[in-house]
Structures are given as C-alpha cells and as structure tokens.
Image (cartoon, rainbow, N blue to C red):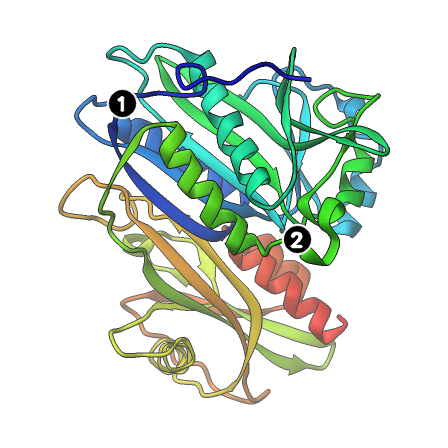
Amino acid sequence: MGYTRGMAEHGFSAPRPAQLRRFGRVFYPAGLRLQKALSAYVAEGSRPDQLVILEHDPVFTLGRNATPADIHVSDDFLATQGVNVHRTDRGGEVTYHGPGQIVAYPICNLRGGREDVGRLVRGLEEAMIRTAGEFGVVADRLKGAPGIWVETPRGLEKLGAIGLHLSRWITTHGIAFNVRPNLAHFRWITPCGFTDKGVCSLESLLGEAAPSWEAAADRLQAHLTDCLALDLRPTRAPSRSVSALTWRRGPGGPQILMMLRVPAHGLWWQSVTGMMEPGETPEETAHRELMEETGLTGTLVPLGLSHSFWVDPAIVHFPDDEPRFNTETCFAMEVAADATVRLEPAEHSEYKWCGIDEALALMKWEGSKAALALLRTRLGA
C-alpha cells in the first residue's frame, strides 16, 4: 500500500508566511463563511496563508461528485439525529464531519512558484501519516484514493480524508482526521464513494489509549506546519461574547424572549447577547447584558456550548481588513413569568415572547438555533 515518501514528495520546502487559527466548535455554515472570507484575504499575494483547525457539528457534506443516493437514510431521520446536510464546492463525494474529528482548512495562495496541487495533497497526507504514527498507528497512502488508510482485521479503513477546492490557485476546504468521532454516522452514507472499504479512528484502533482531540490536534498542527513549510506569524485573538437565551414559563409551555435589533445593529431577531468586557467571566457578562438589554434578572444555566465564527465587517466595522473572529459561550436564563421587559432602544426596537418553534423560525444564526435545541431538550419541550 502507498509508495516511498521522500522530502521532495510530501509538501513544500520554501517557507511561506502563514497564520494559524485554532478554534473549538464551528458550525458548518459558519465554517463556509470563514473560508470565503479568508480566501479573499489571502488572494492578495503579500498576505500570509491561513491554517484553520477546528471541530464541526454533525454534518454530511456533498462534494461535486456526490449524489443524493450516497446518503442512505431519510432527511427526517437525520433531523431526529441532529445531523445536517450541505452541498459544497470541494472535490469528492459525501463525507461526514462531527465532534471528535479534527478538521483542518489550509487556505493557501499557490501562486508564485507553488502551483502544484499534488504536492499540497501529499503534504496534507504526510502530516496525517506522521500524526497517526506518533500514537502508534501505521497509516499510508492508497493509489487513486486521496487520504490515509490503515490495514485492520476488517480490511482497509480510512483514518483521514482530503477534499480540496481550487480557484485561481487559492485553496479552500482540506482534511478531516478521525480521533474520536461517532463512527456509526459513517454507516449512513457511502463515505468518499467507497463501498468496499471502511472508516476508522484513533479510538477504534487504540481504544482507551487513544489521545484526546486536543492532544491529537497539537501534533497534527505541528506536522501540517512542517509539511506545508508554514512560517507562522502572530494572529489577533478572537473576541469573546455570550448568548443568554432568555425564557419564561408560559401557560402553554416555555416562551422565548425574541428582540429585533435596530437597523444599525443588523435588523434580525435574537435573544440576549453581548460582548465580554475585560475582567468579566462569561456568567457576569450574561447577567450584565440581561439587565442592560431588558431590565431583567434571572437564573443562569450553562448549555455546554461554545462556538466560534467569522465577524462580518459589514455588520461590525473594523479599522483594517484583517479578518476578525469571535467565540461565543451559550447560556439559558429563566426570568419570572410576570417580569416586565424594558428594552434598550439603541439596540432593539421591539420584542415578543414566542413558543420554541416560532423562536427557532425567527433566529438567523446557527449558534442561536443550536442553543435553543439544547434548551428544548433540557426542558423536555
């Protein structure tokens, strides 16, 4: 299996400036917006390449060669399992992303002497092979099947997948390396078009000895930096915010407070959100924002969700064009059923209390919808 690897074969040798951006959870549509923004940024040759490492929510992504038949279960079934479906512009067929899997997006400008996609692919494969090897797993390439593969008692199984998109020598999309994902989800698709080969993870191969996502991401990050010859430069840390999904007990069940942002702030419906101030904890920010935006106090419960996203400069204006990112921590905030809402008019023009389904339909962003789904589960509504 595979072929001999040499230094000239598995990536780039001439260093190129790059910025590393490592996040935790990023919802897949937010990841697409993030890639679009960064690809536009690196298109000017003087700007550094970008390496983004993150973890997605459960999602099936359809590449250019995928067909609906590659997914073997119904949309209704996937909805009950919390798995979304998105069509993308990358190559390949259908694949799965989800918690426990490292996704890395090398957003690179290959102009100026690096116009060799094959070398980029081999560099990405080499980084995954080296990472697997550090944890005692022997992986290799398979001719005609991009990614990395492992010989197991069940036959050949894929440990890491590759799917790239190239436009004017700017790359997007990238690799998915399986550390501890839910492998059952792969059985609902024809992964990467293969019907005679399986999918594995470090956990399925190593059991309890498998590394954590963070430990594996540390090693993969180092090997990607080396194999792609990235000269890492400083990056601006993401800003931090909270969402406090504000609700009350109504006669027909839980009611969610939804407020309409004024046009200058985006003109969309949301519950309570706000930026963390220096020295604040997320909990302190949530209580402060609730009071400032609504005049209410409440009982705060963490939802166990934190996610990151690109900040659109059309919504928040910045003094320069370097992309900005934000990480949001999500809470639920119960307020008294008879509490009076006093809006801050500079931020919101109107409000209403909604049932969960109506609130979900009003929400614009993936993080808000995911937080509401967690609250619904918590309340058994």
Q: Which mark is residue 144?
A: none
Is mark 2 in CB contact (under 8 Å) with mark 1?
A: no
Q: Is residue 129 left or right of residue 261?
A: right
- Circle count: 2
Residue found 49% across the figure and 32% down from its top:
127
Residue found 36% across the figure and 68% down from its top:
274
Quadrant of residue 303 within the rendered picture: bottom right
Mark with earlier residue (2, 1): 1
Inspect the image, locate mark 2, and give the three-letter code of the amino acid beneath it.
Ala
In the rendered image, which quarter contains the C terminus? Answer: bottom right
Quadrant of residue 262 within the rendered picture: bottom left
Residue 187, how many percent across, how many down? 82, 36
Q: Nearer the viewer, residue 67 or 369?
A: 67
- Name the secondary structure under disc 2: loop
Disc 2 crowd rating (10 Å Cα; few below 14, some 14-19, many 20+) is some
Disc 1 crowd rating (10 Å Cα; few below 14, some 14-19, many 20+) is many
Q: Looking at the image, is mark 2 or mark 1 nearer the viewer? A: 2
- For disc 2, the marked residue is 210
- Name the secondary structure under disc 1: loop
- For disc 1, the marked residue is 43
Figure check: 353 above or below 306: below
Inspect the image, locate mark 1, and give the three-letter code of the amino acid beneath it.
Ala
In the rendered image, which quarter contains the N terminus? Answer: top right
Alpha carbon separation for disc pair 2 and 1: 38 Å
